[in-house]
Amino acid sequence: MTEVKKLISLVGRNTKCYFKDKLTFFMSLITPLILLVLFVTFLRNVYIQSFESAFPEGFTVDKKIVDGIAGAWLMSSILSVSSVTVAFCSNLVMVEDKINSSVNDFRASPIKPTTVSLAYFVSNFFVTFAVMMCVMFIGHIYLAAVGWYITAGNFFMIIVDCICGILFGTLLAGIVESFVSSQGGLSAVATLVSSMYGFICGAYMPISSFSKGLQNVLGCLPGTYSVGIMRNHYMGGYLTALSDAGVSDEAIAAIKDGFDANITVFGNQIPLWAMYTILLGACAVLLAMFIAVIILKNKKK
């Protein structure tokens, strides 16, 4: 059996192990779904009022546009955060194999250690992507109900943005959790990432609401640009609809600045192509680190 066939078999095995426990899959969904429920029940009006504050006094637009753009902003937050937090949680199979010593069976078999490590990464990517698509499906049902203005082009780019974010998240999870060998350690890391990541990447609160110094610091983190590209494509159709409804360019620019569709670092606005460059550049660096970790850990064994 070639290494490619071995890789495919291991990826299938790891993916099946994850989805075999329905509760584990549900737990991966629970955090993004809780955020969606909290928005609909408690925070929806706050976001709507924030968007309406950018309009001239007395100016009104179709309620579907305002409700929709608030929901689209939330979906960009949920998906960009979940691409990392879910990746850390769904890497459970790798840690469990260490705990129950299944990984030792792989080492005793004619499978290269690099193939085993790569299989965990690829499986984690597919699992995280599946969870993200479920979350997106549920969120888009909500957007379709309140106001759908996402174009086909933007929808395609949202999928691309998810893939970029998941690549970043799975590489980061693969590096960090390669040093975790207990269920308690996995839970601690997953909890820490879930509680902190949304704030430091500007998903839960717009970076524009922070101090200039903190904005510049967060602007140096690649996760910020995962959020930024998602914001642009989720909000793009709604901003066009606002422009068609008569909202001034100044008001639309204020919305983009205030809700992180535009990201400014050290006084310079970062264009969309540069956001992709920074995020994918960070993925390239993480990939090099991931390969280095695999090689170093295998040399010690």
Image (cartoon, helix red, strand yellow):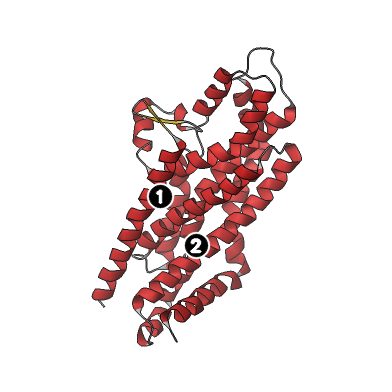
Q: Secondary structure at mark 2?
A: helix
The kind of residue tagged 1 is Leu
Residue farthest left in this picture: 300
Q: Position of residue 2 (x, y in %)?
A: 43, 83
Vertical arrangement, residue 91 with respect to residue 191, above or below: below
Residue in view at x 35 percent, y 32 percent: 216
Q: Inspect this view and state whether residue 200 appears.
A: no
How packed mark 1 is, by other alpha carbons closer than 10 Å (few <14, some 14-19, many 20 or more), is: some
Vertical arrangement, residue 193 with respect to residue 122, above or below: above
Q: Which residue was labeled with disc 2?
A: 125
Image quadrant occupied by the N terminus: bottom left
In-image side of 45 versus 13 (left or right): right
Residue in view at x 72 percent, y 47 percent: 141
Mark closer to the chain start, 1 or 2: 2
Q: Which residue was labeled with disc 1?
A: 280
Q: Position of residue 47 (x, y in %)?
A: 61, 30
